[in-house]
Image (cartoon, rainbow, N blue to C red):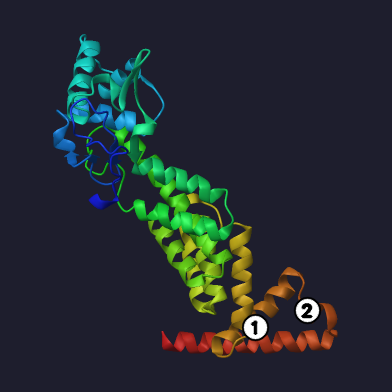
């Protein structure tokens, strides 16, 4: 949740609470609703009831874009509007104006347009709007600039959008859309950190992304690549297997080419290291090369006698390992 000191002050030197002075608003929709108008802080209970509050939230989520009265009626009453919906809507807007821009009438941030209403983007500082702007800028920037922008964006996204708006279906839809953008920013932060060589940071961002979406292939790839680059081959293999099982179970498909390539590199790196596991993997790689007739170096460049000897050694390693594993069980 944002702290109150993150809200911007009024744009003018005149107190924003003064009668007749158009009110500049700083608004928090991520987490609990909070509005700052000069020295006055408003919350969800300060807006005249659930419907006026929802009108404000809907207009803020379309900041700078008019929303028709028909659309507001449809959303507010979920397709079951009462006969007096239009005058009721207009009365709610009047209540809302008195609370967020007292003394300003129709000259404050909440404006009337032809057939609807709009929140004036020049008079509102909105956290979710800033988040979206930062993400768009990061997507179009060089890695160094992008990572800084993503840090700033993700510092805003520390709670669900409209976190205390529990009932309306439209709010849940907006929350899901915002969550998808937060996920995109988190995955992009992992990829960007990796591109800059900040591998530990990349792994952490990837883990955060996977906590949000355990099936996100880009996040798995960033995490597994990071583990590979830090020499944590066994952990990388464990992560790949966890990813593979989740995808097969939930999506009915195997990981994509990028993850498969990372998996092959991890197997090769583990086979080239020291220890019993490396011996087993080396044997498996030899057998796999023979069975698949892929680019197995020993099969391509060695004599048939050497090939047979390599296969016998590989089989011996595997048999010994399996006998010990069965005895331990």
- Residue 93 shown left or right of residue 183 in the figure: left
Residue at horizontal 38%, vertical 13%? 114
Residue 16 position within the rendered picture, expressed as x and y whole percent measured from the top left: 23, 35
Q: Nearer the viewer, residue 104 or 92?
A: 104
- Disc 1, SS: helix
Query: x and y percent of residue 120 in the render?
Result: 36, 28
Give the numbered dot on residue 283: 1
Q: For residue 60, which quarter of the picture? A: top left
Residue topped by disc 2: 297
Nearer the observer, 42 or 191: 42
Q: Which mark is residue 21?
A: none
Residue 77 visible in the current orientation? yes
- For image coordinates 80% across by 88% down, the residue present is 306
Viewer-side residue, 138 vs 25: 25
**How many residues crowd mark 2 within 10 Å: few (<14), some (14–19), many (20+)?**
few
Number of other residues with Cα within 10 Å of mark 1, as a class: few under 14, some 14 to 19, many 20 or more: many
Q: How many marks?
A: 2
């Amino acid at each position: 949740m944002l702290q109150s000191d993150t809200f911007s002050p009024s744009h003018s030197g005149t107190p924003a609470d003064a009668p007749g002075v158009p009110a500049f608003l700083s608004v928090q929709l991520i987490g609990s609703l909070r509005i700052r108008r000069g020295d006055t802080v408003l919350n969800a209970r300060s807006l005249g009831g659930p419907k006026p509050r929802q009108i404000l939230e809907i207009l803020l989520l379309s900041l700078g874009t008019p929303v028709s009265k028909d659309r507001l009626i449809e959303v507010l009453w979920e397709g079951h509007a009462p006969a007096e919906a239009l005058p009721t809507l207009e009365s709610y807007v009047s209540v809302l104006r008195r609370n967020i821009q007292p003394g300003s009438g129709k000259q404050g941030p909440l404006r009337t347009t032809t057939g609807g209403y709009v929140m004036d983007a020049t008079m509102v500082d909105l956290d979710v709007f800033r988040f979206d702007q930062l993400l768009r800028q990061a997507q179009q920037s060089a890695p160094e600039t992008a990572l800084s922008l993503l840090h700033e964006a993700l510092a805003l996204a520390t709670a669900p959008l409209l976190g205390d708006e529990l009932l309306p279906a439209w709010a849940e839809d907006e929350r899901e859309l915002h969550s998808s953008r937060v996920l995109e920013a988190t995955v992009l932060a992992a990829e960007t950190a990796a591109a800059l060589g900040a591998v530990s940071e990349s792994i952490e961002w990837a883990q955060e992304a996977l906590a949000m979406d355990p099936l996100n292939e880009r996040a798995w790839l960033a995490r597994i690549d990071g583990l590979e680059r830090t020499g944590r081959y066994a952990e990388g293999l464990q992560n790949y297997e966890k990813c593979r099982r989740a995808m097969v179970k939930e999506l009915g498909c195997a990981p994509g080419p990028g993850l498969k390539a990372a998996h092959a590199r991890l197997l090769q790196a583990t086979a080239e290291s020291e220890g019993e596991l490396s011996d087993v993997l080396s044997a498996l790689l030899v057998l796999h090369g023979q069975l698949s007739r892929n680019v197995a170096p020993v099969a391509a460049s060695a004599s048939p006698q050497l090939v047979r000897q390599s296969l016998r050694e590989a089989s011996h390693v595997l048999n010994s390992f399996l006998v010990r594993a069965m005895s331990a069980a």
